[in-house]
Image (cartoon, rainbow, N blue to C red):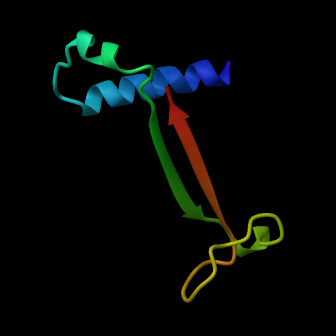
């Protein structure tokens, strides 16, 4: 499934970027640990009707934002 694929990719990427060992007992103090992030990017102006841009000076007419949470 797409969710399982994203979990695997994010898990591997996070493991590659975090260069420290965390004692698993540390997480016993929390009910859950979540990582949340987002990215935004401009689209061609022809998508303006479906994906409005952010507005303001020097901004594109069309843009998209993807937000995800890894738990």
Of residues 38 and 5, which is closer to you in this image?
38
Residue at point 75% right, 65% down?
A: 51
- Which image quadrant: the N terminus? top right
59 above or below 63?
A: below
Name, please, the residue furthest toward the front: 29
Percent x, y of residue 19: 18, 28
3 above or below 66?
A: above
Residue at point 44% right, 19% down?
A: 31
Residue at point 24% right, 17% down?
A: 26
Give the number of callouts.
Answer: 0
Percent x, y of residue 71: 49, 25
Q: Quadrant of residue 58?
A: bottom right
Residue at point 41% right, 23% down?
A: 11
Name, please, the residue furthest toward the bottom: 57
Q: Is residue 30 left or right of residue 40?
A: left
Percent x, y of residue 42: 59, 67
Name, please, the residue furthest toward the right: 49
Percent x, y of residue 23: 20, 13
53 above or below 20?
A: below
Q: Quadrant of residue 43?
A: bottom right
33 above or below 61?
A: above
């Amino acid at each position: 499934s797409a969710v399982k694929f994203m979990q695997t990719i994010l898990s591997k990427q996070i493991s590659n970027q975090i260069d420290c060992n965390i004692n698993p007992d540390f997480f016993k103090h929390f009910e859950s640990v979540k990582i949340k992030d987002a990215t935004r990017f401009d689209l061609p102006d022809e998508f303006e009707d479906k994906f409005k841009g952010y507005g303001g000076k020097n901004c594109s007419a069309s843009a998209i934002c993807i937000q995800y949470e890894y738990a």
